[in-house]
Amino acid sequence: DVPSSQPLVGQDTTVKVMGYSYPRDDFTNVTSKILAKVGCNLHNQAHHPLWLVKERIKAHFYRAYIMRSGNPLFSVHDNLSPVVTTEQNFDSLLIPPDHPSRKRGDNYYLNRSTMLRAHTSAHQRELVCSGLDAFLLAGDVYRRDEIDASHYPVFHQMEGVRLFSNHELFAKVSSGEDLSLFESGGHRTPQKQETHTLEAVKLVEFDLKQTLDRMVRHLFGEELEIRWVECYFPFTHPSFEMEVRFQEDWLEVLGCGVMEQELVHSAGASNKIGWAFGLGLERLAMVLYGIPDIRLFWSQDDRFLKQFCLPSINDPVTFQPLSKYPPLINDISFWLPAEGYTENDFYDLVRSIGGDLVEKVTLVDQFTHPKCRCLIRRGLQGTDKINADPVVMKERLARRKSRTQKHSHCYRITYRHMERTLTQEEVRVLHASIEHTAEQELGVKGRY
Ligand code: FA5
Ligand code: MG
C-alpha cells in the first residue's frame, strides 16, 4: 500500500470539508488544493459555461418530457454534497470490494469510509429510494488522474435516471397488457439481465438511446455525427457509451445502460425497470464551444467568462480562444523508493505545489541502474558459479535483482500561465519546491 504522502492542512487529526470534520486514517489522501475546490460549484455559477450546458440540458428535458399533470417529468438536483460514503460511491452500485476503481491511487479519500464522489452515480440509489422515477443530477466529481488538456482532478457530471412501470413501458404497444417486464428462469445474455424479458429491455434501450440522441441534437444541431459503443459498468447491463465526432476523431461523452435490477430492487422499486446515464459536462462544453483546455473552466479571467454572458441560454457562443502565452518546460528525475510509490502520488504533489500553472506532466523516461546489473553479474561469477544449477541460479538472480536494482523516473513538467508570460525565476522556484517536497514526502531521491 502507498504511504500517506500529501501536504495536508496542518497536522490536524481531522479533515474539514464544508463545515464538517472527518477523522484521518491510513486511507486519507485528499490534498488541500483539492479541498479548496469543494464548494466552488462551477455548475451553479450563473453564466459559467458548465452552468450554461447544464441549463440547456435542463431546459430541454423540462420542455420535452411533461406529465399529464403538466409538470416536468424529470426533477433536477444540483446541490448534493460531493462528500459521500464508499458505500454510496461503490457498494450501492454493486461494485465489488476488490474492484480496481476503488484504488486509493485513483480516488480522493477523506478516510476509509468517506470520500469525494468519483461519479454522480453515487446518488442513484438514494434518489430512487426517496421515491423519484425520473431525475437529473449535476455535480462536481473528483478523481486522481494524469494531467493534460482534457484531464483535471475535478470535473462535472450530469446523471439521468428513468424508471418505468409495466404499464408505462408497454402503454404504446398494441396488446401491451399481455407483456411483462420480468421473467423467471431466464439467463443473462449480452442483450439482457436474467430477470428481464427481452421485449422490456429492448424498449428501455430504445427509449434511453432516443432520449440521449434528442438531447445532443438539441445542443449541437442535426449535423452532429454520433455513434454507440458497447461497454461495461457493474451497475448497468447492457451498457453503452456515446461518442461524438470532434476534430476528426471520436470523443466519448457519456456512459449509460439498463440499470441492474438488483440495484433497483435494493432501492425499493422492484416492480420497475430503468435506464441511467452519466455524462461529462466539460466534454460537452469543450465540443460545443471549442474550449481547448479543461483548465480554462477554472479561469477567473474576464476575457474567458464574459464570452458566456448571454441574454438567453440558447444564444450561440462564438468562443474566441485567449492568446496562448509561451510554456516553460522543466524535467525532474529521481530514484524511486523500494516500494509504495505510485505515479498519481507525484501528479498530486505537482498539482498541490504548481496548481494551475502546471499544464502537463508526462513520464518521459524510466531507467534501471546499470551498475546494479553489473553487481549481479559479478556476484554470479564468484562462488555461485560452481556447481550452478540453472534453476537455482535463475531464482537467486531474480531475488538479488529485486533487492539491488534501482529504478528511476523522469517526468517532464510543462508550466504555462493562462493570462501572462511566466518568468524563468518563478518556474525555478516552483520546480525546486517540487523537487524538495517529492524527496520529503514520497521517499524518492533526486538525481539532479
Ligand atoms: C461513469 O462515471 C459512470 N458513472 C457513467 C454511468 C452512469 C454509466 C450511469 C452507466 C449509468 P465514466 O468514468 O466513463 O463513467 O465517465 C462518464 C463521463 O464522464 C465520460 O464519458 C466523460 O464524458 C466524463 N469524464 C470521465 N472522466 C473524465 C475526465 N477525467 N475529465 C473530464 N471528463 C471526464
Ligand atoms: Mg468512460
Image (cartoon, helix red, strand yellow):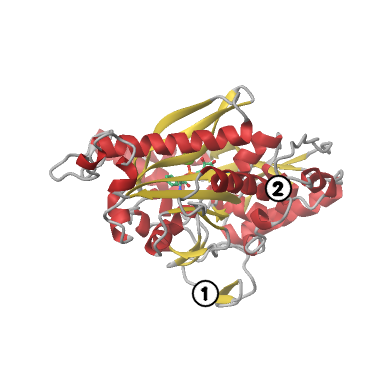
Query: In the picture, residue 325 is in which quadrant?
Result: top right
Other-residue count near label 2 (Cα within 10 Å), few / some / many at <14 / 14–19 / ≥20: some
- 132 vs 421, nearest the viewer: 132
Residue at coordinates 40% horizontally, 37% vertically from top-left? 207
The picture places residue 116, in percent across and down from the top left corner, at 52, 61
- 212 vs 191, nearest the viewer: 212
Residue 260 placement, left or right of 108: left
Image quadrant in which the N terminus is located: bottom left
Callout 2 secondary element? helix
- Name which residue type carries label 1: Tyr
The picture places residue 126, in percent across and down from the top left corner, at 41, 63
Residue at coordinates 61% horizontally, 76% vertically from top-left? 19
N-terminal-most mark, 1 or 2:
1
- 233 vs 182, nearest the viewer: 182
Question: In the image, which disc is placed on residue 22?
Answer: 1
Residue 54 placement, left or right of 258: right
- Name which residue type carries label 2: Phe
- 125 vs 365, nearest the viewer: 125
Question: In the image, which disc is placed on residue 297?
Answer: 2
> Is any part of residue 388 visible from this angle?
no
Residue at coordinates 65% horizontally, 40% vertically from top-left? 285
Query: In the picture, residue 225 is in which quadrant?
Result: top right
Other-residue count near label 1 (Cα within 10 Å), few / some / many at <14 / 14–19 / ≥20: some
Query: In the picture, residue 410 is in which quadrant?
Result: top right
The picture places residue 337, in percent across and down from the top left corner, at 52, 53
Question: In the image, which disc is placed on residue 30?
Answer: none
The picture places residue 250, in percent across and down from the top left corner, at 55, 27
